[in-house]
């Protein structure tokens, strides 16, 4: 995945993270947690671990990434509404 998005530490992963979070809460603890989750799911080493080391297909890894982000989003909404 790193090759597709401009390298492990390049602007590609940041742009993907920004795109995933477009229109979402960005500030405070909730925003920081959501950004961390989004950054994690687009990271090269996350994908390498899921696909190469854990044996998931790309489709399975995408489904898991979506599940992670949805859970993080739900937790973020809970933090925002209670705080």
Image (cartoon, grey):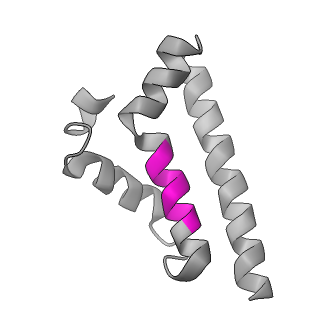
In the image: residue 26, left or right of residue 68: left
Our reading of the magenta stretch's main secondary structure is helix
Residue at x-position 67% and y-position 58% = 72
Asked if the stretch drawn in magenta spans residue 25, the answer is no
Give the answer, above or below, for where 46 lies relative to 74: above
Q: How many numbered discs?
A: 0
Q: Where is residue 82 in the image (x, y as percent from the top left)?
A: 80, 85
Q: Is residue 81 left or right of residue 31?
A: right
Residue 65 vertical position relative to residue 74 in the rendered view, above or below = above
Quadrant position of the C terminus in the picture? bottom right
Q: Where is residue 76, by image quadrant?
A: bottom right
In this view, the residue in front, 18 or 9, is: 9
Q: Quadrant of the N terminus?
A: top left
Q: In this view, does 29 lie to the left or right of 45?
A: right
**Residue at image location 76% in from the left, 84% down from the top:** 81
Q: Where is residue 44 in the image (x, y as percent from the top left)?
A: 37, 33
| Magenta-span inclusion, residue 38 | yes
Residue at the spot 28% in from the left edge and 31% down from the top edge: 2
Q: In this view, does 41 lie above or below 2?
A: below
Residues drawn in magenta: 33-40
- Whether residue 58 is visible, yes or no, is no
Q: Residue at x 50, y 53 (%)?
A: 38
Say if residue 59 shows up in the picture: yes
Where's residue 58, x and y in %?
51, 20
């Amino acid at each position: 995945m790193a090759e597709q998005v401009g390298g492990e530490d390049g602007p590609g992963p940041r742009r993907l993270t920004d795109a995933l979070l477009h229109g979402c809460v960005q500030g405070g603890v909730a925003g920081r947690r959501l950004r961390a989750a989004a950054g994690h799911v687009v990271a090269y080493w996350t994908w390498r671990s899921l696909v190469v080391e854990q044996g998931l297909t790309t489709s399975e890894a995408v489904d898991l990434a979506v599940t992670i982000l949805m859970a993080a989003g739900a937790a973020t909404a809970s933090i925002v509404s209670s705080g």
